[in-house]
Image: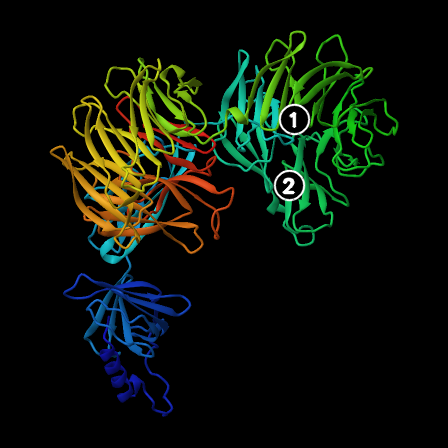
Amino acid sequence: MIKITMIITVITLLVGCGGGSDNSTTTPTTPTTPTTPSVTNNIQGRWLLKIPNTTCIESYTFNSDLSSEIISNEQVTTGNYQFESQVKSGDRHPLTINISYSNLLPDCEGNTQELIGSSLSIFVSFTENYEMHWYETAEKTTVLASFIKEPQITLNQLPSEINYGESISVKVETIPDVGIVPELLYGPNGMKISDEGVLNWEANSIPFSSIQEIHFALSIPDYGTTKESSIKQISDVSLSAYSNLSATGKRGDISIANFLSSEEKQILLLTHSKQVSILGKNSNEYTQKWVYPYNLDTIKISNYDFANDNLSHVIAMSSDKIISIDPKTNKKTEIVAIDKFEQENIIRNKQFIDFAVDDLDEDGDADIVLLVACTDCGNDSNYDLWIWDTGTESISSLYDLNSQAFSIYIGNIINSSSKQIILDNGLVFDSELNKLNWSHSDSEETLFTLSDVDDDNISELIKFNSQDKSLEILKYGDNSQVSSLALEKPICSLHAVRLGNDSGKSIITGPCESYGSKLNSYSSINMELQWSLFIRHTSNILAAAIEDNGDVELVTSGNSSINTIEFNPTPQYVWGSNFSNNSGTYITAGTTLDNDGSKKAIFYSPLNSWKLNIISESGKIDQSNFYHPENGIAGTIHNLDIVDYNLDGIYEANIQIQSEYGHTIFSQELSSGVLLWEKHFSPDESQSSYITSIKLDNADLNQDGYADLVTVHGYQVYVEDLINQSVLWNYQPADLISFVDAGLSKNEQDEWVAVVTSQRRNNDNSVFGILELFEYSNSIFTLKNSKPLTCEKVQLIKQAKQIACVTPNGSPHGNKTEILILDSSLTQISNYLIDGEVSNILQPITSQNLLISSCDEGEFGLSSNPNCTLSMRSTTSGKIIWQTPALLGAVSNNSIEYIPATDISSSRLHFATENAMYVVH
């Protein structure tokens, strides 16, 4: 930085010479020569000063608010400035910098200076738009310092979007031209800048959506210049997510319509984990045909045919927005959000309670009837009804309720030519929210449905009178019941449907008991009981002719269960699924290759069952039970690894179970279940290590072409050549408390490197973390480097030249995680913070970036419903290259499998979350 001694000298000179100004008071005479024209220059921006005989560059920033910042090596100086932007042609611009702060750290020449309170007054000239020179006075010709304006990196004709598989070549330029080709600071896999300054990239990032934002950055390190940019990758997404088929048990968690085919109906299901899924019928089974793979925080689902093409869109409501999704393309469109109505005279903090959709005014555009409630109004009832017109995208009607309501129905209960809005609190409105002078109930949360039971094209209202415990049929305007029937028990669901062409409609009621009761059918003509089936708690009943044969099926949902009932001719359960037989966190187990070259992704649920979920490339999902009692092994599964260890074309499942004494690992053929071997592990008597399962993997350490067993327990890192039955590594240090994580990778010399992180105990019983790096040579793992450092996860990256360490450090509120990047000597290269908690970190083969799964939620730590994503990030800075929308739960530990692309197949990514299994290719 320009020395304070020089500043003082300049100030002294200026004061001694009167500041370089003319203080004469003589009245000037009338000029006899033309007025000299003025020139204007702007000093705002960042200017760079190269310090002679060093590689250091100082930066001088002049802001529009007249504040300034000077950075010289570690020294940061701030203050304010005055600059005369307009002077006579040929004159220099006066500049004064007043220094108010300095951090007293070394500058580019290694000096520290007390600069606070100092001022620098000099004169400035601009020879070009990007060059600036400083002079001691307005007259002197000796240049004190020469600056260039921070060079700007430009991308000549960078397209805004590119199709997957296409390539771009874009010229990279700098203004002004500093003779240096910018470097790629970070970017997607395969992006490079040539020596001639051309940015080249083939769009092949893993596609998580049809339009995916890909971020990258260029830099000129010597000048501290960075340019961040992005491009949209357009792709035909092949992303599938699969989860348990269990309902929420809340009202509005199922719907039936033509979603994927105009020839056959499907079931829309909101699962226990809030996943929106479409089920299609295969024979007597229902299987997942479509799923929206990202978290919507949905509380109710429905459908509507917006295009009038006999194909419905999914409609999903959360507490603050309603969206539609086209299941043919996965395109999500926001219909209306709560913040559309944030007006002080109408709203406090509102949330959506219920909705119904129909074309109320028959103008061709859907109308959304919204029930909205205040969330911070205490005991005061503050409920509103809104009608949102999707054509004009505005509120067409609004009504301020003076009572609570929770359910909306739309139907024609007056005549066949008009539609009414009916609430569960008894109120009825016309299509413009004019309240009608009739109420069907005087109590809140009345269970009811609408159906034309007498075939006059006008719907009757069928309700459960909770006070009298009776089932009643009402007509609009008539306070007396058309029919009624006293029930033995309360009911929690209600539906009316014609089950046969030669009979009237049947009224189906579902029980409230969680342990089960009767699903009953009553005739709408005489209210006589027609049939009964045992069923558990039922919150929704729907009916439809799913197949083109016209036969009606019942679909019921209740406490985490969904069932279908057919009539042949008597009612019988055909298919069902519930949370108890589908629960559990999913984890990837491996990939198998069929004889035809197709791949199958395999997932399992640890601690839950011995079932495998096998997903083929076509999307078909099968379950396989690999428990074989004849093998004599039982327990809860902690780890599972599927691979063809001996290359005989038959895949083996290596399974790890845990007990209080240690671990058992055994192998059996995946298809036949034949037991191949069994091994038992436990801590040495001298160890006080924890019995924990950390990792079960495979690697060909001795490079004989066969996979070797790799397992990490809390008390042991163990590697065995299964073919030759020889132990390659059994690491159990005496001072060990517990291993935390370990990883293996090959370096540039094609040698294996291992990194291990563990908790140890000193002689004084104090606990410390340690990171160790080993190299495998001559059939021995040799310790190369170690460092006291606590890592919760470790990953070898960049061909084992670097290590990524996830530390327990982060932000004070625990909503950020620190990642360290170390070299092979365990010296820190860089560090950065990731929002939230990190569950996985790895570097895909052929990539220089990191694939990181994390969950975050706001400023003050994680909530019960965090935002969990998978992102590709820069290894050195953690900057996001691409990031998925919010996933269906946190990605499970050690549950990401990446398979690189080949000449005949695209790359594949398999990963699993607490609630879903993902396949991307």
On screen, 183 above or below 447? below
Relative side of 618 to 306, left or right: left
Label 1 sits on what residue type? His
Q: Is residue 199 visible?
A: no
Q: In which quarter of the image is the C terminus?
A: top left
Q: What residue does disc 2 label?
A: 352
Label 2 sits on what residue type? Phe
Q: Is residue 151 visible?
A: yes
Relative side of 781 to 76, left or right: left
Label 2 CA crowd tier, 10 Å (few <14, some 14–19, many 20+):
many
Q: Which of 812 and 401 is in front in this view?
A: 812
| Location of residue 456 in the rendering, given as x and y in whole percent from the top left corner | 81, 18
Q: What residue does disc 1 label?
A: 537
**Residue in the image at 30% along x and 53% along y:** 765
Q: What element carries label 2?
A: strand
| Location of residue 764 in the rendering, given as x and y in whole percent from the top left corner | 28, 55
Q: Which of 144 and 741 is in front in this view?
A: 741
Q: Which residue lies furthest to the front in this view?
A: 685
Relative side of 570 to 312, left or right: right
Q: Which of 767 and 299 is in front in this view?
A: 767
